[in-house]
Amino acid sequence: MTENTKPETVLHNSVGFDDISDSELLDIDLDLCTASLTRSDSHVTCCSTALSEDSKVSEMEGDSEDKFRKKRKQDKQSPLKRFNLRYLCVTDLCSQSWCEQQMVYGLEMPYLQQLEKAPEVEPGASIHLAKELEVHDIVSVSVKTREDAWAVKLLNLLSMITVLQQGGRVRELPVFGVIEGIFLVGVIDELHYSPKGELELCELKTRSQPSVPGVAQKRSHHLQVSIYKLLFDSMVKGQLKQESLPQYLCLKTETALGSQVLEHARKLGLNVSSFGDLLELAFLNLRFSDIPAIDSLKIEYCYQANNSPLGEDIVHFDEQQVTRELHFYSMYWIGEREAQGVDIEDAWKCRYCDFADVCEWRMRRAGNTIWKQRTKRAK
Ligand code: SF4
């Protein structure tokens, strides 16, 4: 299957399983200086439905932030357990790198976020979709179970492995794996081979402003592509264990695949009947694929209004630095430390934060004159 023959990517169409690039959503979030957990790829419903009853928006509306403060203190569970999250998205960690406290408030009090900002996602999503359609067609498949939803990811992965093996270009490639004991999921915007034959990751960021982002936002973008590399490399090097998916995601390997998923698998020439069959096949293909690790990381910025390029960054991959950062973030999720707000040099972020009026971190620093000046909100 080459680029010209346009392979198909499967998009499952159960409510909430949107396949918009997570990178795109992250970019919009950071543009607006809000950091909600972006449920962007096919895990959307799993994560949303996995949120505990206590964290449902409807139940939280009208509750005071005091309730969350008290609850957090009494609750001995780790945040992963408290929010009933089986896994995190790569973009969750990027939101965390922007402001961890803001990300937590986004989970606890999502109703405080300015929902009218959502339409700004649309232009960026359209550009991503157009790019995706350049390399493959999109087929809609109905899914009935969580196993079906993950099967769709695996089917996409399998068809993309074939394209990469043949030297082609792929877009919206699902990646996942375990880092610091936490299951992470993401979607790589694009992978292709350079003229020198090196495997290059390219992340497209669409901007609502005709300018490249500032240093703080770029830092998040660099973290994002670095984590993608860690996940992808571990998949193609055979370091990710097949058992990790059922174990972390509570998926049952014996679950029979839904009729539409089966039909698509057959079209790809795969003889499978259960989720476990497909899982085994996907891991066998990964193990014997001979696809190299990612050689270089690039981020392209373009202006949403007219799709014109704004610039590009070549990201230096510093494994030690990324690993250190991931260790620090994971300590929050496993309950080894409390959430932290921004440092004084990043206090300007508070001016644009939807949670500024309820933020304990900000209030605790209210006596500090420099902090006060830097966080002063426009009237
Ligand atoms: Fe973070 Fe500042 Fe918002 Fe608090 S007010 S959540 S410290 S950005």
Image (cartoon, rainbow, N blue to C red):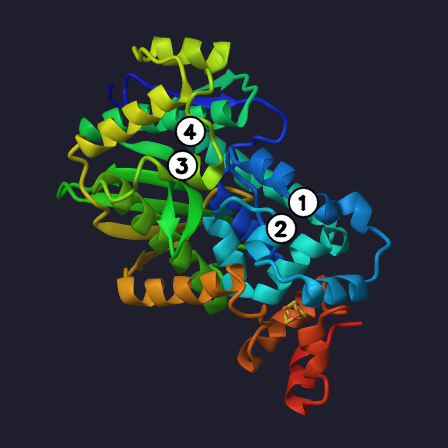
Mark toward the start of the polypeptide (1 vs 2): 1
Q: Where's residue 54, x and y in %?
A: 73, 48
Badge 1, how many Cα within 10 Å: few under 14, some, many 20+?
A: some
Camera-nearest residue between 190 and 326:
326
Position of 72 relative to 373 (above/below): above
Mark toward the start of the polypeptide (3 vs 1): 1
Q: Is mark 4 within 8 Å of ligand 1?
A: no
Position of 162 relative to 297 (above/below): above
Q: Which residue is mark 2?
A: 83
Q: Residue at x 63, y 45 (%)?
A: 120
The quadrant of the picture showing ligand 1 is bottom right
Q: Which residue is mark 4?
A: 153
Of labels 4 and 2, the one closer to you: 2
What is the distance, in whole Å, between disc 4 and disc 1 at their CAs?
25 Å
- Left or right: residue 180 compared with residue 127: left
Marks 1 and 2: CB-CB under 8 Å? yes
Examine the image and state in which quarter residue 150 appears.
Answer: top left
Q: Which residue is mark 1?
A: 52
What is the distance, in whole Å, between disc 1 and disc 2 at their CAs?
6 Å
Marks 4 and 3: CB-CB under 8 Å? no
What is the distance, in whole Å, between disc 4 and disc 3 at their CAs?
12 Å
What amino acid type should be assigned to the residue bearing mark 4? Lys
Mark toward the start of the polypeptide (4 vs 1): 1
Q: Which residue is mark 3?
A: 245
